[in-house]
Image (tube, rainbow, N blue to C red):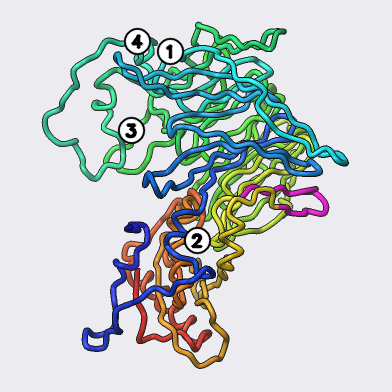
Amino acid sequence: MQFPLFHLASLLPFWPPKERPPKFNFTRGDDVFSPMDMVSMRKPGAGIANPTGDMFLLPIKTYNETEAEYQHSMLLSSLGMNVQQTHEFTLSDRDSVFWLDSRTIAHIVHIETEDYPYEKYNLKALSLDLKDSLDDDAGYLRVLHSSFVATLPTITGSDFRYLPQAQRLVFYDQIPEDDNFTMYRPEEAPVYFDGPPPDYTSMLTRVMEDRATGDMPTLMSVSLLKADSDAWSLGTDYARLIPHEQLPDISTERHYDVSGTRIIYRTEAEVEVPDCTCRFPQDIYVNTIDGSTIPRRIASARVVVSPTLNHAGTKAAWVEIKGKENSRIVVYDIVQDIEFTLIDDMDLTSASLVFSKVDNTLYFISANDILVSVYSLLIPQTPLSGPLDSPVPPNLITETTSLSRIQALPNGNILATRLSYASPNEVMIIHDPQGAKVVEQVSHLNDDIVQRTNLTEGEAFVIPRMENAHGWLLKPKGWIKNDGIKRPVVLIHYEGSGAWSEQWFKLSNPNVLAAQGFFVVLMNSNSPAHIFRVNEYSNNPEPHMLAKLSAGWNHILLTYLEACASMMSVV
C-alpha cells in the first residue's frame, strides 16, 4: 500500500552523495505511530450543537482499507449528561445533515437515478430520543423514526441551515437568471470558448465562462413547516435572497448567517480595479429571511470575515481586515442604523465570531503568532452616533493550538472544535467562559491510537531576534536530553496562512517522522500563522525569508545538541 500523503520520498538530502546514510528502514511496533495509523485515524469535522445545547452533530471520515476509500458517517452525541450517549449512522459522501429543532435532524440523501439529471436529493426528518443514565438505567440516544419530507427541486444546493423562528430553510445554490432550478432544465450541450482567459495572472474568475449557462451563485429561502402531528412539509415558493453577482463560494468558510427573521451575507463588490490582480472589495448586506424586502447594504471593506447576527436579529457583527496586523471588530445596530467599532487596529486576525445566547457578549477566535486564542467582548449600548467613548478590552478565555469553530450554548458554555498535532479534530466544551474557564474534551474518537503511540502535540518556539517568525518542534521518540545520541533532522517550511490547521492528515507526517527517530522542525518564515492574514511582502522577500530560516535552524542546533546538522533534510 502506498501513502501519498507521507512526504518522505520528497525529502531533499543536504549531505553529499558519498556520505548518504544507508537505506532507511521503518521502525515498527504497537507503540510506534505508523503511516497506517495516520491513514486509519478517524477524521472528524466540526461539532454543531442543537438549539438546547444537550446534543451535537459531528461528521466523520473513516478510511476503509478493504475498499481503499473513505467512508462518511455522522456521530450524534449527548452533552452534559451523567453518561455520554452516542449514536452513529452512515452517510454517502454527498449527503448533508443539519438541525431542524432540538430533537429533529434533517438528512438530505443523495440518490442516483436512471433518467436525466441522473441524480436527486430527498429531504428526510429524523426524530431523536435522548435519555440520561440514572441509577441502574443505562440511558440511550436513538433515532425514533425517519420520515420522507420532499424531493428537492435542485441538485446543486449546499450549506443548508434552518431557522426555527421563521420556519425557513436557507441554502446556497447556482440558479439561472430565470429562477428555474438546474434540475428542471433540459439537457444542454456544453459551451466552449476559444482562446485563453484574458489574463493568466489574474486571481479573479473568468466571468464569461461562469455565465455560460446563466447560473448565478445565490442564497435561496423556502418555508419548512412542522405540523401538530410532527410531520414536516417543504414549501414550493422559493425566494432568491441575493440579487447581486460575485457571491463568494461559501463552501470553504462562513459567508452568511441567519437569525431571528433576517439574514446577513457578504458579496464581492461590483467594482473593477484597473490593472489590479487583487481581490475586489466586499460588501455586507442584510435582508429579511423570506426575501420580501430589498437587500440593504450596510458596509463595505477590503476583506470581511465571519459576518454574524445576534439571536434577536437586531445587531450584526463582523471583522474587517484592513492590512497586515491591522483589523477591527465592528458592530452594526440594524434597528437604529448605527455602526460602531469595538476593537480597532488589532494585531490579531479573527477567524470566527459569534454572539452569546443572551446577545450581550461576542466570542471570537483569533490567532497570534503561534497559538490560537478564544476571547470575549462585552457589547455596550449602541452609541447615539459614531465611535464609542472608550474601547472595549477583550477578555482572554483560553489559548490552544487551533480551533475551527465556536458556538455559544444556552447554558453560557462554549462548544468548540480543537485540532492539535496529537489528534484530529475533537469537540470540547469551555465551561464558565467568564469565570473558571474550564476546558473539557467531550469526543474521544482516536484515543486508542493516541494513547497506544503516545502522540504529543509538539512544542511551539519563537525564533530569537526575528519578528513574526516561529515554529513547532516534535522530538524523536525515545529522545533523552543530553544522551549524546545524534539524531537526524527534518526541516519543514510551511506558509503562515492558517492552512496548516485545516486538515490533520496532512499534519500527521511530522508525527510519523518523529516516531522514526527524527527531530521534526516546522518553521514559518513569512508571517504569523494567522487565518485570513493579508500578506504584504517586501519587494525582495527572499533574503528576509532565508534569514529567518537560518536563525531558526541555528536556534534548534544550539538548543538541542542531539540534532545532527549533517543529517538534515528539507521538505
Q: How crowded is mark 1: few (under 14 residues within 10 Å), some or many (20 or more)?
A: some
Q: Nearer the viewer, residue 138 or 261?
A: 138
Disc 3 marks a residue whose amino acid type is Glu
Q: Mark 3 points at which residue?
A: 272
Q: x, y percentage for residue 83?
A: 77, 44
Disc 4 marks a residue whose amino acid type is Tyr
Marks 2 and 4 sit apart, C-alpha to C-alpha, by 48 Å
Q: How crowded is mark 2: few (under 14 residues within 10 Å), some or many (20 or more)?
A: many
Q: How crowded is mark 4: few (under 14 residues within 10 Å), some or many (20 or more)?
A: few
Marks 1 and 4 sit apart, C-alpha to C-alpha, by 7 Å
Would residue 470 appear left or right of 451 to someone viewing this image?
left
Asked if residue 432 lies in the magenta stretch, the reply is yes
Taking 96 as reference, is 449 above or below it? below
Q: Name the residue under label 2.
A: 528
Residue at the spot 69% in from the left edge and 52% down from the top edge: 441
Would residue 206 appear left or right of 175 to someone viewing this image?
left
Magenta range is 426-440
Q: Nearer the viewer, residue 175 or 324?
A: 175
Is label 2 or label 4 in front? 4
Look at the numbered disc 3 and give the secondary structure of its residue. loop
Does residue 471 appear in the picture of this structure?
no
Q: x, y percentage for residue 522?
A: 45, 69
N-terminal label among 1 and 3:
1
Residue at the spot 50% in from the left edge and 77% down from the top edge: 476
Q: Name the residue under label 4.
A: 184
Marks 3 and 2 sit apart, C-alpha to C-alpha, by 30 Å
Residue 355 sits in quarter: top right
Disc 1 marks a residue whose amino acid type is Pro
Q: Do the residues labelled 1 and 4 touch (CB within 8 Å)?
A: yes
